[in-house]
Image (tube, rainbow, N blue to C red):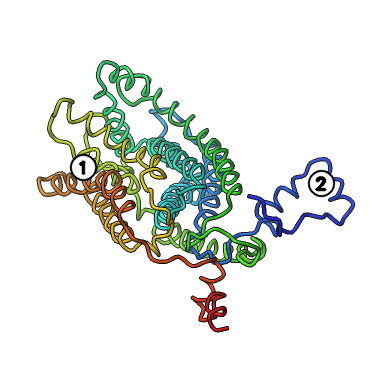
Amino acid sequence: MSFPWAKQYEPKQPLMRWLDEKLPVPRLVYNAVGAGYPVPRNLNYFWNFGVLAGAALGIQIITGVVLAMHYAANGGVAFGSVESIMRDVNSGWLLRYAHANGASMFLLVVYIHIGRGLYYGSYKAPREMVWLLGVVIFLLMMATAFMGYVLPWGQMSFWGAQVITGFFSAIPLVGESIRIWLLGGYAPDNAALNRFFSLHYLLPFVTAGVIILHIWALHIPGSNNPTGVDVKGKQDTVPFHPYYTAKDAVGLGVFLLIFATLIFFSPNLLGHPDNYIEANPLSTPAHIVPEWYFLPFYAILKSFTADFILPAKLWGVLAMFGSILLLFFLPWLDTSPVRSSNYRPKYRGFLIVLLFDVLLLGYVGGAEANARNVILGQLASAYYFLHFLVILPLVSSSERPRALPNSITEAVLTKNGGTSPAQTALAN
């Protein structure tokens, strides 16, 4: 998006002028995250989570590269190499805990980031491409996280790979061939470890590339804001630096404080104790569960218990992938012209119900598969799809939103007890 009032980059030092002429990296940075990039003046702390996701990815790449120098992708020694990192490598325990807990923090930040997009309608025009690239990033993250969970080669790693890849065998005709191709054999072993390790190392860099496209796509229409009202002029914006760099620094400090507390005081809080037992193909754990950030999708996967036209296992696989792919169509399922849920009370109510529904799916995904939990999972899974395919289109076409402010400036002044331009005009 072109901002005529944006401050232009004008290097003053001869070296910077020369660099700007030959390789304009400083100009690019200045226009992307500096004073040359105006942003809406009313962004709240939920807009910090994009920067936090980038910081979390940086932590994962740095710690992952160092860990890869000491890890051995071989079924006979993989578990021992991880234990050696913890005990024999200088600060290896810190690197391993930072990487393992960093994955959880990364996914947590991204889930909040997605929730902010849902609440404030950041998927709506003209930001559809920003949203679509964000969903691609989410899929890449999930694939990377799954393959990373296999690498420690503990009991939960082995059996998680066995169960998840086993669901591909439900695909008619080619399913078993796909499963064997993924694993490089009939069961997780050296070939699977090598493949997962290679892809786990590569995909974060692919993710970083898509994030660059994500940011590029964002800079074309500009950032959304809590009102969902388009920028009307210079009075609606402030330079990204120093206003939002300072705000992001506060959020990053809080993030790092929570992250450090998790690493130093409770590093195994989010892990599973069975994964500290070396993988044993002859001993099945009593209760196989994935990491917490996969639990809602795992609950959808196992909610199908009866064959209907297609095998139940295949329905589960289709529903699990469909629950994510559904997000690609969100910009066209929600036809309301109003973006922000602050002005859509009915939609906001259903969005809150969806939040509790996803939390219920997370509980069911990690709970024992008894009759009560299966029924809860089936009901929660049904509501998840109903929300996007039925409720959202109906609400967006029938809801009467509240009146929007004329501009971001008016919304800010009114919120802070000032007089909006409209009120000033009426008074005069």
- The tag on residue 20 is 2
Q: Which quarter of the picture shows residue 7?
A: bottom right
Q: Position of residue 215 (x, y in %)?
A: 58, 46
Q: Nearer the viewer, residue 285 or 161?
A: 161
Q: Nearer the viewer, residue 302 or 270?
A: 302
Mark 2 residue type: Asp
* SS class, disc 1: loop
Evaluate whether residue 427 shows in this view: yes
Q: Residues within 10 Å of mark 1 (few under 14, many from 20)?
A: few
Q: Which quarter of the picture shows residue 212?
A: top right
Q: Which quarter of the picture shows residue 304?
A: top left
Upstream in sequence: badge 2 or badge 1: 2
Q: Which quarter shows the C terminus?
A: bottom right
- Residue drawn at (17%, 44%) of the image: 378
Q: Nearer the viewer, residue 144 or 66?
A: 144
Q: CA distance from mark 2 to mark 1?
A: 59 Å
Q: Position of residue 92 (x, y in %)?
A: 51, 47
- Residue drawn at (55%, 55%) of the image: 223
Up the image or down, 338 lies above or below 365; here it is below
Mark 1 residue type: His
Up the image or down, 66 lies above or below 187; here it is below
| In-image side of 25 versus 336 (left or right) | right
| In-image side of 144 versus 189 (left or right) | right
Evaluate whether residue 109 shows in this view: no
* SS class, disc 2: helix
Residue denoted by label 1: 287
Up the image or down, 53 lies above or below 244; here it is above
